[in-house]
Amino acid sequence: MKHLLLLTFTLTLFSSCTKEATCTDGMIRWGGEPAVDGLGWYFISADLGNKPVKLKNLSGNYQVDSLQVNACLTLLTEKYQCFCAVPLDMYKVEKIRRR
């Protein structure tokens, strides 16, 4: 019985630690071809510190320079390695729509 109770408690604890998506207004930008040291498509938002962030699963429908969007994003643990001062944070797009 103790083992079942401990297992239930542990599963409840870990299932409640899921990351929540952050929804914010921002802009999709083109930072140049990554093959020649550009950033490719990135997202910038005042809520994320006005620094470029990479969107891991950005649909081709939204790959338009200066496109204003509202996006719900989840921060990933991986970083985008580039020729920048600091590697960029990467986010997974949960929901996105044009503004």
Image: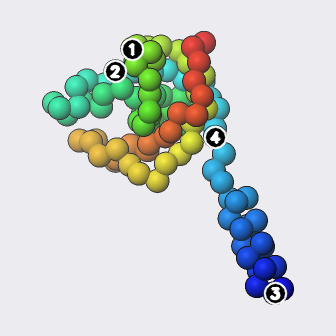
Label 2 belongs to which residue?
30
Position in image of residue 65 (x %, y %): 39, 14
Label 1 and label 4: CA atoms lie apart by 24 Å
| Residue in the image at 25% along x and 23% along y | 32
Residue 41 left/right relative to 17: left
Vertically, is 86 above or below 52?
A: below
Label 1 and label 2: CA atoms lie apart by 5 Å
- Specify the label residue 65 is tagged with: 1
Sequence-wise, the earlier of marks 3 and 4 is: 3
**Which is more foreground, mark 2 or mark 3?**
3
| Residue in the image at 66% along x and 54% along y | 18
- Specify the label residue 4 is tagged with: none
The three-letter amino acid code for the residue at tag 1 is Asp
SS for dot 3: helix
The three-letter amino acid code for the residue at tag 2 is Trp
Quarter of the figure that contains the C terminus: top right
Location of residue 6 by image quarter: bottom right
SS for dot 4: loop
Sequence-wise, the earlier of marks 3 and 1 is: 3
How dense is the environment of label 2, judged by Cα within 10 Å: few (below 14), some, or many (20 and up)? Answer: some
Q: Nearer the viewer, residue 61 or 26?
A: 61
Label 4 and label 2: CA atoms lie apart by 24 Å
Label 3 belongs to which residue?
2
Sequence-wise, the earlier of marks 2 and 3 is: 3
Cβ–Cβ below 8 Å for labels 1 and 2? Answer: yes
Sequence-wise, the earlier of marks 4 and 2 is: 4
Quarter of the figure that contains the N terminus: bottom right
Sequence-wise, the earlier of marks 1 and 2 is: 2
Label 4 belongs to which residue?
21
Label 2 and label 3: CA atoms lie apart by 56 Å
SS for dot 2: strand
